[in-house]
Amino acid sequence: MTTQQRKITLAVTVVYTLIILYFLFLAFGRTGTVDRVSSYTFILVPDSFFRVPNLSDLLHPTLMDLVDIGNIAAFIPFGLLIPLLYRISFIRFITLFILSILIIETIQALSLLGSFDVNDAIQNSLGAALGFGAYKLGFRTSNIRRNIFVTGISAVVLMIGVWGVFGIADKAFTQELGSFVALNELKDSSGNTSTGTKPYPFKVGGQDVEPQYHVYSTEGKRIETYTYTIDKKELYFYMNYGIPDQEEFQGRLTVSVDGHEYLSTSAEHQSREPEMFGLYLEHAKELTITVEGNEKLWDVGYREMKFVWN
């Protein structure tokens, strides 16, 4: 590299660094929110740096999608410019870069112009590492134009590769809602799996109700209790309930999980329309539903949070 080329590279590095610092500290209205922030924010446990927008997200990108891409792409140039200016090994380069990013993240948090987010630090460092890799692949000859072209192509290919790997990792380590499991598929306290009557249509508040799975009621008794063993780590519980038309508007419904009551409602506190109840549960073991009077429940069940390999 000639002296003139080195001066140009140094000038580009300084200007680009100032632009990045502007976006990190002053852009997006950060200065206007300082007086409304009352505490420092430190996110020290990585949890979302694998989350990158997919192709469908890019068709209608949100601000967060652009931020996720920018956290990586915006720091690729540092991996290109620094090795051009100084002979430096990758280990030394990435170590110094990570330290610099951690200092900047700390200043952001302490100045209330942002937060210390280890996810951002990881994404920024990954971008710099991609740039360094592209530099090593591209700058192999004395032909500057060829080197720049090959380096640019290498950066794009590496970015796409990391994007794909992150997408796979995100899919593998992110839980999603599984299929709906009707409650009558579980064994009750007596070991039966068919508790509850078969679906049949009825009206609630003039609306037609057509259950898909089952109907729970007192079945001619004054009160009926259903107890099921769930024993799941993480799930969302759902049910519909109401008092059918042409029946006396009286009844009561209670839902308890592991001895803790989550729903207790009686006819006088209900509307005359179908109602839905949802509940997020962690490490739930036993579900108890108590039905009194003319109360009816239908399509009661849950969706479990699962990893893609489950």
Image (cartoon, helix red, strand yellow):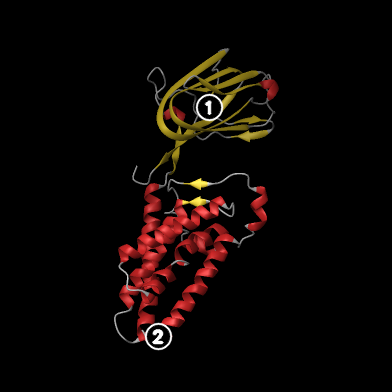
Q: Which quadrant of the figure contains the N terminus?
A: bottom left
* Circle 2 Cα neighbour tier, 10 Å, few/some/many (<14 / 14–19 / ≥20): few
Is 260 rendered above or below residue 276?
A: above
Which residue position holds label 2? Answer: 3
> Foreground: 45 or 225?
45
Disc 2 or disc 1, which is closer to the eye?
2
| Residue occupying image coordinates x 45% and y 22% | 195
Residue 292 rendering spot, x and y as whole percentages: 59, 16
| Residue occupying image coordinates x 44% and y 79% | 9
Is 302 rendered above or below residue 63?
A: above
User: Residue 211 lies in what quarter of the image?
Assistant: top right
Please report whichever mark, 2 or 1, sits nearer to the chain's N-terminal start: 2
> Foreground: 144 or 191?
144
Residue 28 rendering spot, x and y as whole percentages: 61, 60
User: Residue 157 lies in what quarter of the image?
Assistant: bottom left
Disc 2 to disc 1: CB gap under 8 Å: no
Is 139 rendered above or below residue 306?
A: below
Residue 117 rendering spot, x and y as whole percentages: 48, 51
Is 49 rendered above or below residue 156?
A: above
Q: Amino acid at mark 2?
A: Thr
Residue 163 rendering spot, x and y as whole percentages: 40, 62
Q: Circle 2 — which element?
A: helix
User: Residue 295 lies in what quarter of the image?
Assistant: top right
Q: Report whether 38 appears left or right of 7.
A: right
> Foreground: 71 or 207?
71
* Residue 298 seen: yes
Numbered circle sitting on residue 215: 1
> Which residue sits furthest top?
222
Q: Amino acid at mark 1?
A: Val
Q: Circle 1 — which element?
A: strand
